[in-house]
Image (cartoon, grey):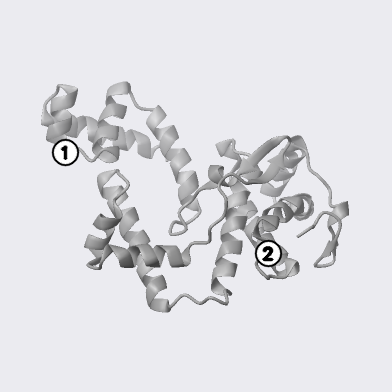
Amino acid sequence: MALNKVEICGVDTGSLPRLSHKKSMELLERIKGGDDSAREEFLTGNLRLVLSVIQRFSGRGEQPDDLFQVGCVGLIKALDNFDTSHNVRFSTYAVPMIIGEIRRYLRDNSSVRVTRSMRDTAYRALQVRNALIEKNGLEPRLSEVAKELGIPESEVVFALDAISDPISLNEPIYGDDGDAVYIEDQIRDEGANDELWLDSIALSEGMNRLSERERRIVRLRYFHGRTQTEVADQVGVSQAQVSRLEKAALNKMKRYI
């Protein structure tokens, strides 16, 4: 799908402007102030990002115009949800949003239909997976997910495969001022919403505000699934002290998340 010098949706892709990082930041500041002309200029200046992404989905029998329009929806959503305070390049944030929008479109319009029951099973499996991660702080095995759902492990595998849309993890999607953005850098859970990615950044910031002992307690409790008694043995304090330190650490983190 050669999109560099063709017209898509009435847009001459060969004449699309490029925005420098400095100009992008200036426009984002104006957009925050409600400047509609800056918003239009910013979106137009990032249409090349949409083009770069949809080239990864060539050979699927879809019209470039359709993919471009869907990609633009993802671009708009990315702009509406982007927060400059996290010091993340817009392209890095926008790529997974655009990919997600296109993948949902391809999945919903695929000629190879996935049954409703299989799709429901897949989404339930993703929900259980997320719940187990939140509970134990560890990635669950498929057998654990299957046990929670009360179905054979093979059904979980088939259901998750049915809603997946394979693509090479090593493919560069977009180059922003010389820095390539790769699929493997943007891996995300389709069962999760886009805000979770920014939540992880906020969580990291919150952890950095804790003392070393507080960080160790939080990691053991919520990332490794240890009980307060087990943590007390490892840290060398009483269970009551672990409880008090854990509560104080969580309250401290809440102020930054």
Q: Quadrant of the N terminus?
A: bottom right
Image quadrant in which you'd find residue 103? bottom right
Element type at mark 1: loop
Q: Residue at x 75, y 54 (%)?
A: 47
Above or below residue 132? Residue 202 is above
Q: Would you call the spot at circle 2 few (<14 residues within 10 Å), some (14-19), or many (20 or more)?
A: few
Q: CA distance from mark 1 to mark 2?
A: 51 Å
Q: Amino acid under label 1?
A: Thr
Front residue of this view, candidates 142 and 244: 142
Q: Amino acid under label 2?
A: Gly
Front residue of this view, candidates 60 and 26: 60
Q: Residue at x 48, y 62 (%)?
A: 164
Relative image position of residue 52 (x, y in whole percent)? 71, 52
Q: Quadrant of the C terminus?
A: top left
Relative image position of residue 89 (x, y in whole percent)? 63, 39
Is residue 253 in sight in this rendering?
A: yes
N-term-proximal mark, 1 vs 2: 2
Element type at mark 2: loop
Is residue 248 in sight in this rendering?
A: no
Q: Residue at x 65, y 67 (%)?
A: 60
Relative image position of residue 115 (x, y in whole percent)? 43, 78
Q: Would you call the spot at circle 1 few (<14 residues within 10 Å), some (14-19), or many (20 or more)?
A: few
Q: Is residue 80 rendered to the left or right of residue 132?
A: right
Above or below residue 173? Residue 239 is above
Q: Are marks 1 and 2 in contact (CB under 8 Å)?
A: no
Disc number at residue 227?
Answer: 1
Above or below residue 241? Residue 185 is below
Between tags 1 and 2, which lies in front? 2
Disc number at residue 59?
Answer: 2
